[in-house]
Amino acid sequence: MKDLTDIPALMHDIGARALTEVPAVGEAEEVGLDASLADVMTTTDVDGALRASHESGISLVGDDVGTPVVAFPGPEGEPIAFFGPIMSPAPKGEDAGRLWDGCVLVAGTPGFFELKRTRDVEPMFD
């Protein structure tokens, strides 16, 4: 891995293995993170903060969705959150910017709630 964008591919490749089996220290260091972040996998030290962070996102989007959750300024500047976007492959460069701009646009549209279609490709981590 070279940077944080490699983490989704790593987690997908790991599959169903328990998190405690993941060589998290090495992966953290490979993407430039402090290896001590891996220590929290086996403690309850940050559980409260993690739950609060999760609740903050879910309170904006509702509890009938999963992750990822992203928030944008709504029509009156208030945060509006959505589940997604789910992309495969993820856009890069100007394509990613256009996607972001589109998300900002729909979030600022009163009454907009959802777009969805069935996946027709497997995850790609290019």
Image (spheres, rainbow, N blue to C red):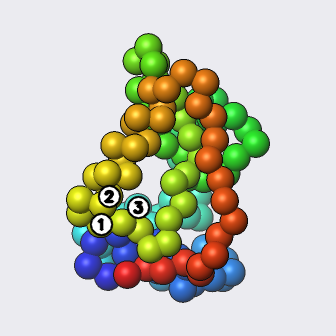
Name the kind of residue labelled 3 in the image: Leu
- Name the residue located 63 percent from the left edge and 75 percent from the top edge: 120
Q: Is residue 19 left or right of residue 75?
A: right
Name the kind of residue labelled 1 in the image: Lys
Q: Is residue 105 visible?
A: yes
Q: Is residue 44 left or right of residue 2?
A: right
Q: Which residue is mark 3?
A: 37
Please tell me whether mark 2 sits on a helix, a strand or a loop. Answer: helix
Name the kind of residue labelled 2 in the image: Ala
Dot 2, how many residues are within 10 Å of its Cα: few (below 14), some (14-19), or many (20+)? few
- Name the residue located 58 percent from the left edge and 58 percent from the top edge: 43
Image coordinates of residue 41 in percent, x first then y, are 55, 64
Mark closer to the observer (1, 3): 1
Q: Quadrant of residue 75?
A: top left
**Labels 2 & 3 near each other (Cβ < 8 A):** no
Q: Quadrant of the C terminus?
A: bottom left
- As measured in the structure, the alpha-carbon distance from the residue carrying label 2 to the one carrying label 1 is 5 Å
Q: Outermost residue toward the top?
A: 76
Q: Which residue is mark 2?
A: 96
Query: In this rendering, is residue 76 above or below 17?
Result: above
Query: In this rendering, is residue 52 above or below 88?
Result: above
Q: Quadrant of residue 21?
A: bottom right
Q: Is residue 30 left or right of residue 41?
A: left
Q: Is residue 21 visible?
A: no
Image coordinates of residue 58 in percent, x first then y, are 63, 36
- Name the residue located 59 percent from the left edge and 31 percent from the top edge: 112
Q: Which residue is mark 1?
A: 92
Dot 1, how many residues are within 10 Å of its Cα: few (below 14), some (14-19), or many (20+)? few
Image coordinates of residue 1 in percent, x first then y, are 32, 82
